[in-house]
Image (cartoon, coloured by chain):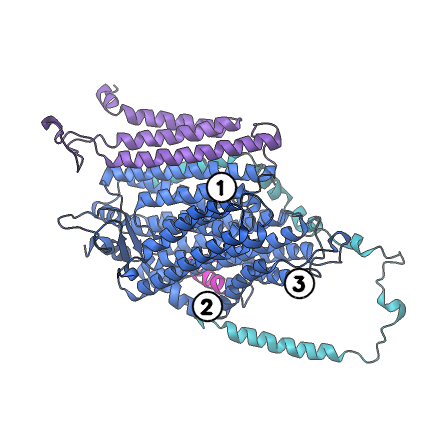
Amino acid sequence: MLNTGFGYWEPIIFALTFLLLGCIAYFIYIRGNPKHKKVGEQLKPFLSGNPEPAKELVHIRGRHIYWGFKEAFAPVYRKLDEMHDGDVRNYMLWFFGILVILMLIFLGGM
Amino acid sequence: MMDISQHYPALIIAIPLFAAFLCPLFKERIKALATLAILALLATLIFVVLLAGQVYTSVAPITYTYGSSSPGLTLPSGYHVPVRIIFEIDGLSILMALITVILALVGAIYAYSSIKDESGKGKFFALLLLLTVGALGMVLTGDIFNLFVFLEISSIAGAALVAYYNYRGEANEAAFKYITVSSVGGVLVLFAIGILYSEYDLLNIAALGNAISTTGLSTLDLFALALFVGAFAMKAGTFPMHMWLPDAYGEAPAAVNPPLIASTQASLYALLRVTYIMYGGAVFNYTTLGWVLIVLGVFSMIFGVLMALKQNDIKRFIGYTAVSQVGYMLVPFGVGLSTIGDDVAFGTYGITALQAGLFHMINDAIYMGMLFMVVGCVYHATGKRNMEELGGLARNMPLTAIFFMIGGAAVSGVPPFNGFASKIMIYESIYNFHPLLSIIAIVVSIITLGAYVKAFQGIFLGPKLKEFENVEEAPTSMLVSIAVLAALVIVFGLMPSLVVKTIIAPAANALVNPYGYYAGVLGGV
Amino acid sequence: MINWEIVVQNFPFLVVGILMAIGVYTVTMKRNLIKIVIGVEIIESAVNLFLITLGYVEGAYAPIYTMAPKAAENNMVLPTPQALTLTAIVIGLAVTALMLALAINIYRHYGSLDVRVARRLRE
């Protein structure tokens, strides 16, 4: 049991509770609906009447996930992209810049 | 018969070094090379564990003097400054040595399958063992110039290993950027060592710390401190100077990533050793230095994870989350440093912050090593690194998918894995210092979880794609090394109090006891 | 105005400063990869010169020596910085060799030594 100084964290009890609730949920899921018959048109996805394309074409690639987040943060990302342009000289400039700032802080105010 | 139990520190450096120079003899025979490397690292692990037993049962740090008649003889008769190179091992050093050796062993086991079809295998294993020796030397030594030498050994070996796939242009470019930034950082550390030597005529960390605490801080000392903090923070991957980290981690072979993570954390250890112990006895304004570390840490956390969300290359993506996790380590160390002068605050949350930062170091090493090896498995099996071209691999590689899920949950701090155990200590201790820091840390955790869900969906979920019909599960030795780290993730997650009490608490106590460190070499000053 | 005696006495430190400035300028402003390697080398030479200059103190002597003349009794340079400098020179050699080998490989893959061309690894 981990004492974090302001409370306690007991991972074994957490894991057992999680397992217990998972088992209860699984038993409810297994019973299912006895009146539902798995047949026919009900199983296919509804795409407003359009034919269903092949499965590979429907897969969402990595770039399109989180599009909304990236659009919302577009100014921040533009600034960050300017910073990370892959030029070695900028790596060194940032390093020396931070060194100069640290020297000013330590020699000035400490 | 020589009493070998006195000589563990020397054996820990000597065995991998000897094996590293034997490696080029076995030119391309992977079985002999892997056996040699794994046996050498297993022997080193045994000696590190035995040395840990010695350290945890002794009151003072263990010193080992090279070239003297007995290992504990730091001050020969008539001298009042220490002579010869002295290794001084306290709780913090042995924690870092454990991390390094476990990661190097796992990397060597992974390398057996991963570089089977490459050329230059003998040199690969030689450089891997040299990288391990560099990181081990950095954490065990008590002499500041020795620290510089091992720092350069590990950065040169690391850069050569980053360029291992030299048929890819990007690997050479990443290695060039890594070695440029690393070597300039290293010579600036040497400049600072020269400044300190010119003032005190001493090179031993304990003796220098004692001299600085006796004579007070002069302007030159503060100049040297600024150089040390800047150079070691850059080598650890802090925000504005972190740009080499995704490049180098992304282009290195997956077997090299765990030892490379160990050498990055050894640089963070060097930062702690210089600020808490070498300058720890002197009276200066700790709050300024603490806030510098906190600000650098917060920027690393936020911008690391924002850049990670955009990435499509799977290894660069994990490299950016590694930058973000470095921020999680710097903020509690900054909080601990700010509260050293104030006894009440320190007793309440300062010591917990230090324990949280150290616990996060070992957790970060374990789950980051695991994640890099998992995506190395994906690259090895399919030959593709871009999330745009991957998909649906969970049907062919189910074990790899489960390990990625465990790793992703551990990074984001999802209970009950080990990430959550250290992160809840971080959240609660930095909340008392300033509530905004804790809020930023929690939000960054959530965004990290989002980024890993994106990566999991992009690589593993989805329909089975035609080009990946014949992809099979990763080879056994790769899965064994990942499983070892996954077992550590689960064990550290389910029993965090055992870990904190055994290996983290002695390290945190060693950090706030600079006079104990000085007395280990100078003998009861 | 300027106390020339202090400048003359501390001339090596002035040279260290100038070399360091030239090295930092070369690493951060030059476009050719080989010039960046030379810049790293200049910074290393500056630090090596700094270390050697530290040895010239009054009343220093080497702990072990044979057949030194009487006038050189307490009139030598400190030997420890020279040991540090030798180690640093060897480390600098290894770094230069590695950087030049990587620059050759970059030329073979990218076709040019310009830093603005060799940056496929960007965001």
Q: Which chain did the image draw in purple?
A: C
Residue occupying image coordinates x 33% and y 24%: C15
- Quick check: is B424 in the magenta stretch? yes
Residue occupying image coordinates x 13% and y 48%: B78
Q: Secondary structure at mark 1?
A: helix
**B461 relative to B385, above or below:** below
* Picture quadrant where residue B216 is located: top left
Give the alpha-carbon distance from disc 2 to disc 3, as whole Å.
28 Å
Quickly name the residue at label 2: B496
Q: Dot 2 surroundings within 10 Å: few (below 14), some, or many (20 or more)?
A: many
Tell me: B135 left or right of B325. Answer: left
The earlier-in-sequence mark between 2 and 3 is: 3
**B346 relative to B293, above or below:** below
Give the alpha-carbon distance from disc 1 to disc 3, as whole Å.
33 Å
Q: Which hue belongs to chain A?
A: cyan
The residue under label 1 is which amino acid type?
Ala
Whether labels 1 and 2 belong to a single chain: the reply is yes
Mark closer to the observer (1, 2): 1
Tell me: A83 left or right of B137. Answer: right
Where residue B83 sits: x, y (%)? 22, 46
Magenta region: B421-438
Quickly name the residue at label 1: B159
Whether labels 2 and 3 belong to a single chain: the reply is yes
**In the rendered image, which quarter contains the C terminus of chain B?**
bottom left
Q: Main secondary structure of the magenta part?
A: helix
